[in-house]
Image (cartoon, grey):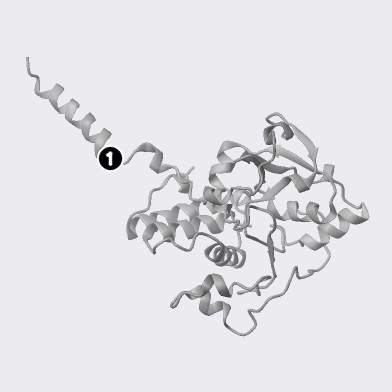
Amino acid sequence: MSRDPDDLVVRSRADLADLAELLSHDLAERPDEWENPELGRYLEAMAAWLRDADKDVAPSWAAFADALLAARVYE
Amino acid sequence: MHHPRLFAALACAAISLFVLPAPAEAKRFKGDVKNLVPEAPLPNAEGYLPSGGETKLLDPALIRFTQASCSVRFRDGRSVEALIADLKAGRISAEQLPPLRVFVLNGAIWSLDNRRLHAFKTTGLPVRVVRATAKEIQKESYKYSTANGGRSIEVRGNGPTLPPRTVSRGLENKGAGKVGGLLDRLPGREVTRDRIARPGGRPR
């Protein structure tokens, strides 16, 4: 079983790459825990979250990570 | 007596305490909890919830949305509108659906399951609820995007790419250079409300 993506602190490009890899493994191992396990729904959820969530957050690797993680659960 | 190994161990401990990030940083809680503030707290909100692991029926009017918007479709592709129709017709009852996962914060009851809450609020029928676990509340904290205290929710339309929004976002995206603002000004991005999707069955 791979590491929980929620446990990873993202501060750099390399961290973000690790997160993307963890998310890929997480999807393969636990697809039922993903609200949006298909690419189309995942991207639609990401777009909605980016519009709905706090708009004062400055662009950063961490903000990028938040978008990847949010799209996993956003309805 | 000075001992080099003891000194090194103490130095490492001091570095881990004051230099390395605190363990709490490893756990994400990125939702805007500041959004989960009701305009009028519910007296004894905790008293409405069942004990841990148990479920009970609750008036959906007492429960608030966590998200600002939600998809018109459930995870399995079935539509919220179909569930509303089935609930109204009595083809599906609250007991046949997964309970809403709810929690109390700032004197209000909040749901992690926004689409089903929308369906029950629309019908006015009592909804079955269960206390959300601490892990669920943390993992799904990205959902805390409501901008109106959870009173209402936008239902996003359906489509393979950039669907139309149900409410204009022009005022929120007025900043120059913001991608969201540009997208919202494109043709076909104007307002529709609660688009009706094809009928379906029981949502997951």
- Estimate the x, y position of residue A4 in percent, counting from the top left: 47, 45
User: Furthest-left residue in view?
Assistant: B1
- Estimate the x, y position of residue A40 in percent, counting from the top left: 60, 68
* Residue at 75%, 52% in the rendered image: B116
Q: Residue B127 occupies which quadrant of the picture?
A: top right
Identity, as a three-letter code, of the amino acid under mark 1: Leu
User: Secondary structure under badge 1?
Assistant: loop
User: Furthest-front residue in view?
Assistant: B40
- Estimate the x, y position of residue B42 in percent, counting from the top left: 69, 40
Instruction: Work out whether A46 lies above or below A19.
Output: below
- Estimate the x, y position of residue A38 in percent, counting from the top left: 61, 62
Subunit of label 1: B
In this figure, what is the number of numbered marks? 1
Check disc 1: other Cα within 10 Å, few if <14, some if 14-19, many if 20+: few
Quarter of the figure with the N terminus of chain B: top left
User: Furthest-top residue in view?
Assistant: B1
* Residue at 59%, 58% in the rendered image: B147
Q: Report the side of B162 relative to B13 (left or right).
A: right
Residue B204 in view in this figure: no
Instruction: Please name whichever residue, B129 or B37, is drawn nearer the observer in this view of the structure.
Output: B37
Residue A38 in view in this figure: yes
Instruction: Please name whichever residue, B156 or A65, is drawn nearer the observer in this view of the structure.
Output: B156
* Residue placed under numbered mark 1 in the picture: B20
* Residue at 48%, 46% in the rendered image: B29
Instruction: Please name whichever residue, A19 or B151, is drawn nearer the observer in this view of the structure.
Output: B151
